[in-house]
């Protein structure tokens, strides 16, 4: 009888230890940092080309 009670107690303790789903491991995604370019950097080249074309047309 003692073995039956001991087995029931161990079974109850083991079932509460595994109740629910195990927690999923936390995986952190890598952080990607992109540097932004200034907005004036994109307009310099077209302005230089426009000035060069205007200089050629003026001559």
Image: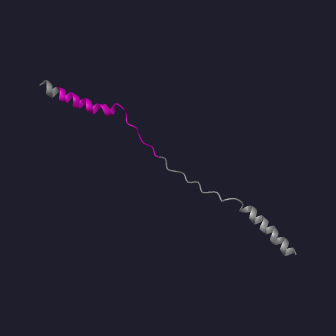
In terms of image quadrants, where is residue 13?
bottom right
User: Where residue 9 appears, x then y in whole percent?
Assistant: 81, 67
- Closer to the camera, 5 or 41? 5
Q: For the point 26% across and 32% down, which residue is it?
A: 46
Residue projecting furthest to the right: 1
Q: Is residue 1 magenta?
A: no
Quadrant that contains the C terminus = top left
Q: Examine the rendered structure and indicate whether residue 51 appears above or below residue 12.
A: above
Q: Is residue 53 magenta?
A: yes
Residue projecting furthest to the top: 58
Q: Examine the rendered structure and indicate whether residue 5 appears above or below residue 50.
A: below
Q: Which segment did they paint magenta? A: 32-54
Quadrant that contains the N terminus = bottom right
In terms of image quadrants, where is residue 40?
top left
User: Where residue 30 appears, x then y in whole percent?
Assistant: 49, 50
Q: For the point 75% across and 64% down, which residue is it?
A: 15
With 13 as the anchor, is 39 left or right in this view? left
With 29 as the anchor, is 57 left or right in this view? left
Q: For the point 79% across and 68% down, which residue is it?
A: 10
User: Where residue 3 appears, x then y in whole percent?
Assistant: 84, 75
Q: For the point 22% across and 32% down, which residue is it?
A: 49
- The kind of secondary structure the magenta stretch mainly shows is helix
Residue projecting furthest to the left: 59
């Amino acid at each position: 009888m003692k073995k039956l009670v001991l087995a029931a107690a161990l079974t109850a303790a083991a079932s509460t230890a595994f109740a629910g789903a195990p927690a999923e491991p936390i995986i952190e995604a890598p952080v990607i940092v992109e540097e932004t370019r200034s907005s004036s950097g994109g307009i310099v080249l077209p302005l230089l080309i426009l000035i060069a074309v205007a200089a050629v047309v003026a001559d």
